[in-house]
Amino acid sequence: MHGSHLSDDEPMAEMNFIPLIDIALTLVIILMVTTAFIKQPGVSIRLPETVTREGAPETKKDLTVLVAADGSLYLDGQKRAESEVQARLVAVAARDRQARVLVKGDRDVLHGRIMEVMDMVRQAGLTRVVLPTDQKRPQAKASANGTR
């Protein structure tokens, strides 16, 4: 007979990679599917849309105060009481009077609530306040003008 003859007691010399590849591909698919559902902690807000935008992009050094549609306040993605927000603003002002504060208000929140938050920022002694917006989509501009 040709070549070597294997008995039942001898180990198989070649490795079968097909099950290994199946497992690897299954794990890759699972990772891809699960990462699509991971969301950042915090609150979801819809910023007002404008054509023009001012100021430098948001940085990690900026203090961001979110005002949800129901008027509740969020710092670092967690709901906070007004007293906690005010205390944090005072602490930031004590460290750096030139710190920038971003007040992100949902487009459905009342204007008066945004002004209350801005007043809290001013009372803490901070003067660099930015009201971020989302970029207005070009198609919304075209439909507002009645053109297609």
Image (cartoon, rainbow, N blue to C red):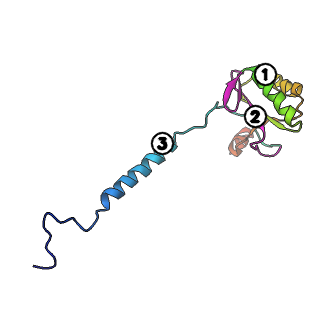
Residue 94 location (% of width, % of height): 87, 32
Q: Is disc 1 surrounded by few (<14), some (14 to 19) or many (20+) residues within 10 Å?
A: some
Name the outermost residue toward the front: 9
Q: Quadrant of residue 112?
A: top right
Per the image, label 2 sits on a secondary structure element best described as strand
Per the image, label 3 sits on a secondary structure element best described as helix
Residue 86 location (% of width, % of height): 80, 24
- How much space separates mark 3 and mark 1, taking CA atoms? 37 Å
Q: Is 104 drawn above or below residue 26 in the view shown?
A: above
Q: Nearer the viewer, mark 3 or mark 1?
A: 3
- How much space separates mark 3 and mark 2, taking CA atoms? 28 Å
Q: Earlier in the sequence, mark 3 or mark 2?
A: 3
Q: Nearer the viewer, mark 2 or mark 1?
A: 2
Give the quadrant of the N terminus.
Answer: bottom left
Q: Nearer the viewer, residue 74 or 13?
A: 13
Left or right for 11, reference 110: left
Q: Quadrant of residue 91?
A: top right
- Magenta residues, as a range? 55-80
Please give the name of the residue rendered at 31% of the width and 56% of the height, measured from the top-left corner. 19
Q: Amino acid at mark 2?
A: Thr
Q: Is disc 3 surrounded by few (<14), some (14 to 19) or many (20+) residues within 10 Å?
A: few
**Residue that numbered label 1 is attached to:** 113
Is 58 covered by the magenta stretch?
A: yes
Do the residues under discs 3 and 2 have CB atoms within 8 angstroms? no
Q: Earlier in the sequence, mark 2 or mark 1?
A: 2
Q: Amino acid at mark 1?
A: Arg
In the image, which disc is placed on residue 34? 3
Q: Amino acid at mark 3?
A: Thr
Give the quadrant of the C terminus.
Answer: top right
**Residue that numbered label 2 is attached to:** 64
